[in-house]
Amino acid sequence: MKNGIRLVLTILLIHIVMMKGNTIPQSSEPQADFPKKVSGILTNSCYDCHVTGAKAQKAVDALDFKKWEEYKLTKKISLLTKICEVVEKGDMPPGKYLKQNPEKALSASDVKTICNWTKKESEKLIK
């Protein structure tokens, strides 16, 4: 009887240890080292569509912040330029998305922060 209980407890312990190893939470946020203020804006207004696993595959294909560190230098520079362009024009986040998520809209201050960051980051990467 004792051996049966030990066997069951051993199997249970092994199962728990194995399951624990498989339940490491995956971060929904990119691992790139963006400035805190920029990261906050991106998290609020961009990550719903522009990270691996988002439902908007076209948006992920255009820019995937989870893969930021994997992008080549030239692609990063190009994307940084494009990011500033689309937020200045008011094209991002898109109007259709904002109708359902008005809290995700970028303020004038957010746009300025994003564009200042993209310009500084591009200059840093070019050097």
Image: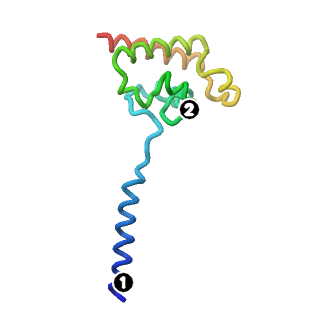
Label 1 with label 2: CB-CB less than 8 Å:
no
Picture residue at 39% right of the left edge, 16% below the top? 75
Which amino acid lies under the numbered mark 2 shown in the image of this protein?
Asp
Q: Residue furthest right?
A: 99
Q: Is residue 126 left or right of residue 109?
A: left
User: Which amino acid type is shown beneath numbered disc 1?
Assistant: Gly
Residue ID for mark 1? 4
Task: Please state which of the two labelled residues, at mark 1 or mark 2, is closer to the viewer.
Answer: 1
Give the residue at x 54% y 34%: 54
User: Up-down: is 24 above or below 61?
Assistant: below
Upstream in sequence: badge 1 or badge 2: 1
Number of other residues with Cα within 10 Å of mark 2, as a class: few under 14, some 14 to 19, many 20 or more: many
Q: Is residue 75 above or below residue 30?
A: above
Q: What kind of element bears circle 1?
A: helix
**Quarter of the figure with residue 26:** top left
Q: Residue at x 56, y 32 (%)?
A: 48
Q: Position of residue 81 (x, y in %)?
A: 46, 12
Q: Quadrant of the N terminus?
A: bottom left
Mark seen at residue 43: none
In this rendering, the count of numbered labels is: 2
Residue 48: give its label: 2
Residue 65 % position (x, y)? 45, 28
Where residue 117 sits: x, y (%)?
Answer: 43, 17
Query: Looking at this view, is 96 or 55 the one in front?
Result: 55
Q: Does 73 sit above or below residue 65?
A: above
Res 72 quadrant in image? top left
Quarter-wise, where is residue 79 in the image?
A: top left
Is residue 43 found left or right of 6 in the rendered image? right
Above or below 20: residue 110: above
| Quadrant the C terminus occupies | top left
Q: How is the image coloured?
A: rainbow
The Cα atoms of the two marked residues, 1 and 2, are separated by: 50 Å
